[in-house]
Image (cartoon, rainbow, N blue to C red):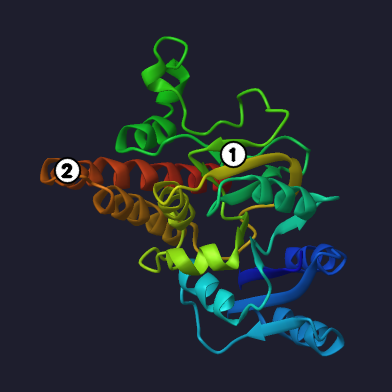
Amino acid sequence: MSTSVIIVSYQTGSSLEECIKAVRSEALIDEIIIVDNGNEPDTRRWMDNQAQKDNTITIMQGHGNIGFAKACNAGAKTASCPYLLFLNPDAVLQGNALKELQNSLDAAAPGSVAGARLLNQDGSEQRGARRGRLTPWSALVSMTGLSHFAPVHPAFADMHQEKQPLPTTTVPVHAISGASLLMKRNDYERLGGFDERYFLHVEDLDLCRRVRKAGGHAMFVPTAEVVHYGSTSKANRLRVDWNKAIGLVRYFIKFSHSPIEKLGAWILSVPIIVAVMSRSAFTILRQHLS
């Protein structure tokens, strides 16, 4: 079935070229929508040149950096194909990845989403492609390294499952990654797309939760492989992680089921923000010292 691929690009760099090359070679993709949230002049000239040579490419520009969720929704509104593939600009489709995603989505419950197995450049599975339940506790366990105590007690299990045995077939999980996410356009529109109150990060977790609440599943497809470079954008690392921290807090407050849960989410917002930003600062320091 024909697919519209939506790629949101912000200060992406050369990896965008590899991403588009793989997309253009995919027979199941009939429409390529690049949402330019802000790029260097050389990158924009390259995109314009590609659009002039290939009438399946549409470039949306002039809106500034409106955030990932809002940009995805803007791209989806112009899409005409029955399938929507949201693909990061530094993600490269491998082999029959899209066909595997489509087959799994067609076999799943109505309203489901399907996500690829994300790979690092060395072929190892990347963090985030299959995730367990997100709670304030599971977030803190994951961010602070408390997951090292998982052998002692299951309460310390990491919500990220890339170190668990790889399933041989498609399986439902709590959440997949927005770096490579396939959904039927009608289902996407029915849910209202991504929640635009998330600027960057956590919007995929939010979408998967709403999918499951509506009766669908978040399907992890191990046979659909996508190489994801990750962190190729020139965006400020502290700003990126600040948006992630705020996104987590927004998620927990949004899905609180009672005033007590909501109060707990507000109370835990401080340690969550501190944990995210401390890890970010430590990573930046280590990079400068290395």
- The percent coordinates of residue 73 (x first, y second) are 51, 73
How many numbered marks appear?
Answer: 2
Say which residue label 2 marks. 267
Say which residue label 1 marks. 127
Residue at the spot x=36%, y=20% of the render? 155
Residue 169, above or below 262: above
- The percent coordinates of residue 31 (x first, y second) are 74, 76
Residue 9, above or below 88: below
Give 90 or 167, whichever is nearer the viewer: 167
- Mark 2 and mark 1: Cα distance apart in space: 28 Å
Give 214 or 260, whichever is nearer the viewer: 214
Which quadrant holds residue 246? Answer: bottom left
Disc 2 crowd rating (10 Å Cα; few below 14, some 14-19, many 20+) is: few
- The percent coordinates of residue 49 (x first, y second) are 81, 86
Residue 177, above or below 45: above
Quadrant of the snapshot with the C terminus: top right
Question: Left or right: where does residue 224 sit relative to residue 206?
Answer: right
Residue at the spot x=48%, y=39% of the render? 174
Disc 1 crowd rating (10 Å Cα; few below 14, some 14-19, many 20+) is: some
Quadrant of the snapshot with the N terminus: bottom right
Which quadrant holds residue 141? Answer: top left
Are the residues flagged by discs 2 and 1 in contact, CB closer than 8 Å?
A: no
